[in-house]
Structure formats: C-alpha cells, structure tokens
Image (cartoon, rainbow, N blue to C red):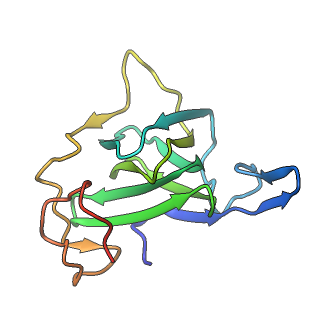
Amino acid sequence: MILLKGISIKPLKTFEDERGFFTEIFRRDWKEIFTDDIIQTNMSVTYPGTVRAWHKHERGQVDYFVITRGAAKICVYDEINRELNEIISTDKTVQVVRVPGNYWHGFKAIGNEPTIVTYFVNKLYDPKKPDELRRPWNDQNVTPRKINDRIDDPRCNKPWDWLAPPYK
C-alpha cells in the first residue's frame, strides 16, 4: 500500500513463551519510525463499534498509535488531495502507525472486545489551548477520491462510512 506522505508503519516483534508475551513498542533508536522527539504517552480504551474521529492538529503534533489490546481501523484523510489511508491494526499484528497531525484522522474499535490504544505524541497536551480541530465522525464532506492509493475502490467519491460492513 502506498501511504500518504509522512505516514509510516513499523511491525513490532512479539516474543511469546509459556508465561505470555513481550513486545517493545518504543525505542529511541528506531529512527526509521520515531522521527520526532516523544514527550508524552497516552492510553485510551474504546468499546467495540465506537468511532473516535475526526480530528487534526495544526501546531505540529504527530501521533504514533499502537494497538495494545483488540483491533482498530485507523483512517487518515488528506482533504486537499481527497486521499484516505485505511490501516487495520491489532494486538495480534502489533505495529506502530505514525500519523502527521496535519491530516484528519481517527479510528474505529473493531472486533468483540474493547480496544486499547497506546499512543505517543511529540507535543504536550495543553487543556487551555488544545492543538485540535474537530469535525463530526460522520461528516459528509469526507469523500475520498482515492482509498489506499486506489481509485477503483467502490467507496471512492462517497461520504466515508465508518459503520459500513468490512470491505473486501
């Protein structure tokens, strides 16, 4: 898949044994994915079927998402070029997804259990002056002409539908 400029994905290695498993999710020396100085880490729990979208950052915040429990459909929308990346991320295929804040982005918790998202950011959150613009999760103006670099996807040129059944 060809990703929007600045988005990157790094698969993470999980080491399993009879006790459970272990995964490194952040290392300062992973310069190929963590190109920003990380200064805050957050965790969110989202119930199945819930959509947390759309928002973007205008003062340079970059988000690094890791699904540590459950599964999510992460979507990133470039409103200038009307291109959308749809990335499925789960706790079974652990990865870091880098999302530059200038794109509209969000996710839907998919599957039958709550999704836990651990995310790293390069800017401290300021509750008095948050670096966030928001639009409704079902905003009819989010109409991608390209999805995952494809123009033949039948969902193209239609308002993005977070609640549609999985696309094949």
Q: Identify the residue at image location x=28%, y=64%.
A: 165
Across and down, in percent, residue 153 comes to: 24, 79
Q: Identify the residue at image location x=36%, y=40%.
A: 57
The answer to which of 15 and 28 lies nearer the viewer is 15
Across and down, in percent, residue 157 comes to: 13, 70
Across and down, in percent, residue 102 comes to: 35, 49
Indicate left or right for 158 with 17 as reference.
Answer: left
Quadrant location of the N terminus in the rendered image: bottom left
The answer to whether residue 6 of the structure is visible from this angle is: no
Location of residue 102 with respect to 30 vertically, above or below: above
The answer to whether residue 8 of the structure is visible from this angle is: yes
Quadrant location of the C terminus in the rendered image: bottom left
Across and down, in percent, residue 93 comes to: 62, 64
Q: Identify the residue at image location x=46%, y=50%.
A: 112
Indicate left or right for 94 with 161 as reference.
Answer: right
The answer to which of 110 and 128 lies nearer the viewer is 110
Q: Identify the residue at image location x=42%, y=77%.
A: 2
Indicate left or right for 123 with 166 as reference.
Answer: right
